Amino acid sequence: MTLPALFYLLIALFYFVTMLDALRKLRIYKIADYLLVFFLFVSFLISMLLFSQELGWLRVFVEGVSRRLPWYGLILLGGILHNLTHAVFQEQNPGWARIFLVLFLIGTAFVLDANLFSLPDVLWSGSGIEITRLESSSFILLAAWAGFTGFSFLYLRQALAFTDKTVVKNRSYYWIGGLILFIGGSVLLFSSHLILGSVLLFAAAVILDYLVLTYRLPDLRTLTYQLSSSTLSGILSLLIFALGFLIFDRLFQEDNWYHPVYNAGLMALFLLFIHPQINRFVQRIFQYLLGDDFNRRRALRKYSKRVSSILDLELLARVTVDLICDELGVEDGTLFLADKLDSEKDPPDWCLRAVKGVTDTVPDLELLPANNPITRVFVEEKRVLTQSELEVIPKYQTIPKNLFAWLNSIEAEAYVPIHTQDEWIGLFALSMKRSGGSFTDEDLEFLTTVADQTSVALQNARLVRNLTNIDNELRRSKAAENDALEKIERIKRSASDFISIKAHELRSPLTVMSGYTRLLSNDPTLMEDEYYQKLIQGLLSGLERLQEIIDNMLYTAQVQPRSLKIDTEPISLYNVIDQVCRDLQKNVQARKITLSHDGLGKIPKVYADRTALKKVFMYLITHAMTHTPSGGKITITGRHIPLRSELLKWEGAEIVVRDTGIGVDADLQQKIFQDLAQPEFVELSFDEGVSIGKEEVTERLSVVRSIVEAHRGRVWVESPKQGESELPGSEFHVVLPLRQQSHPTKVVD
């Protein structure tokens, strides 16, 4: 076996191993992967043909065919490479017409080389020009190879000219390198430089294999920077080694202990320590020449200081995106807020809302499904997702249409999720770099750190926005409540006006009825008859009650807290209550009830309307008499209230009307003073009896509330419970300020 044959066999073995690796990484529904495997298989066959040709195993074929078999393989490779270029750059159609064309051209050349149709060696001659059969075959093969290779270049040029995506441009640059190696290797094989041509073809195959199976390629600019800095560092190290070796050799070569090996070892040990410093020095020089600032620690400290105290979402979006764009050279970006659509669903769906701090043209994403590969990257894997992954990895090709359209609309190159603890709260969507390069591993690590530092500030800003929204909602609710209260007040005023008008209208017929009834009562003949006497007395009693109800209706309509006009003056509560007790003395004696007051003389004078307060205590004592059986007690007590007590914000006085009656039910205590409370019916059967069916109770208590509140005071009732047998009694509390106030009373909790 010759050395070239061994070389071809070794190349074929490398192709076979590479093809097995491609089969292991084969992805479903990815045409480029299958074309790559086909490309490697044909390359393997070409190497085996060269191996067989070197050993003379192809002599069984016709001479033209045996010499042209590697050429057939190169034409087939050109057609496969043309289809592979289309498939990689997002044209999934394998181009069956082009494949059939390749096979047809190879078949035509094979027919000519094998002379299957017994054609003459010279196919055409004339004007001093002869076209032979073998020359025609060579022309067909070379033209086919040049055509497919040239169209691949044209397609790459079109992809570079009509795309703004950094991923496509970066992959195109690498692809051009692989295509150039393929052309060089093919030309060398056509010109019979078989070994060197095989090496270049193998290099092209390795590059194409890497480009097809790798979803995120290193940035050419960054790769060039790293190679250049490493090369320059190595050259400087070698120069230092050589210079140091020569200096030591010149200085110590006359000494007996000196030996060149010691000199070389010492310099190697010296370089071992200083090479990292040399490398950093060279990197700083390149950074300065390229105008880039790669001091990420300083940038992160600057970023952390700027965002830590920002509570406004729009300002936070502007600051964060601007700093990232300045640091990485990104054109623009957007900050999105991530919110769960249904917290009870596990896992939940999401929506993304763009913060309008940087741009107002980026659309929101209304639905990001939970069971989605992109959602899993953001929520579970918590890592940066690049556009190159979306375009190359097959699982991302099955995303919903709305998500695919949204990704295309925002034209981002990197998506950086923001997490706080275990919750996803936001997303940075960053466009391409201004340099046209792709995001490096260092860039992605920097973005991850930035997202971690942004999480706290973003969470605080979202909390402030939510609190602001809640406050605005409360303000709107308060405004709506005020409007509703104002409408209710207008309705109340209308109702009061209506009641007042109807009460005045009722007075006229009531006066007529009362007059005629009194005439009947003055007739001795009728009054001597017991039957008619009872009827006439019932009529008089009913008319008096009806007159009292109309008077209460009129007074209730007039004494609303906001509309009642009171004429205040300093008055003594003792004098007012004592006068009321004397006025009711006859009724009290008739009911056999004890009525007394105590401690009222020590209370300072209050600014109040004397007539209105007399009506308040008249109604309260009457209410107590109505609900207290014969033999009961009604006690009126009072005390002075200091400034800022638990009852009143201002200095005031408290009067308590306490009885030993049936009490007030707990459910009724909050409603007893309402304007439209239902009439309270008292159903007791004591010997001297309590009045039964006194509907005026709530009417009068409503008047009491209106008068007290018009004085900026408070009134309420306390009673353990209600019952005929136990007679727990009740206490009516009236609290009045000593001085006239201009604002409603506020209870101190």
Image (cartoon, rainbow, N blue to C red):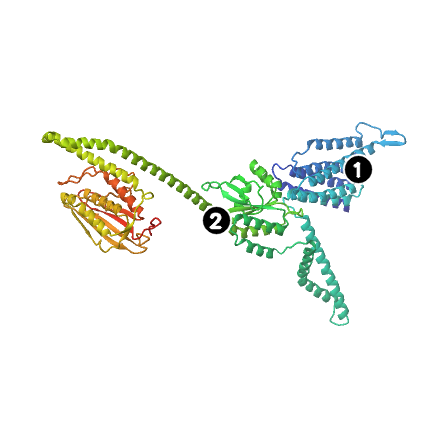
C-alpha separation, residue under disc 1 versus residue under disc 2: 78 Å
Q: In percent of the image, x 19 and y 32: which residue is there?
A: 515
Q: Evaluate whether residue 633 shows in this view.
A: yes
Q: Residues within 10 Å of mark 1 (few under 14, many from 20)?
A: some
| The quarter of the displayed image where residue 668 is located | top left
Q: What x and y, as percent, mark residue 278? A: 68, 60
SS at mark 2?
Answer: helix
Q: Nearer the viewer, residue 551 or 123?
A: 551
Q: Nearer the viewer, residue 492 or 644?
A: 492
Residue for badge 2 = 463
**The residue under label 2 is which amino acid type?**
Leu
| The quarter of the displayed image where residue 250 is located | bottom right
Q: Which mark is residue 421?
A: none
Q: In the displayed structure, does residue 119 sit left or right of residue 235?
A: right
Q: Find the residue positioned furthest to the right.
A: 128
Q: Evaluate whether residue 206 shows in this view.
A: no
Between discs 1 and 2, the one toward the N terminus? 1
Q: In the displayed structure, does residue 735 sit left or right of residue 481?
A: left
Q: What x and y, as percent, mark residue 452? A: 54, 51
Comparing labels 1 and 2, the label whose residue is closer to the camera: 2
Q: Find the residue positioned furthest to the top.
A: 117
Q: In the displayed structure, does residue 197 sit left or right of residue 334?
A: right
Q: What x and y, as percent, mark residue 419? A: 52, 48
SS at mark 1?
Answer: helix
Residue 87 in the image: above or below residue 323: above
Q: In the displayed structure, does residue 173 sit left or right of residue 459?
A: right
Residue for badge 1 = 67
Q: Residues within 10 Å of mark 2 (few under 14, many from 20)?
A: some
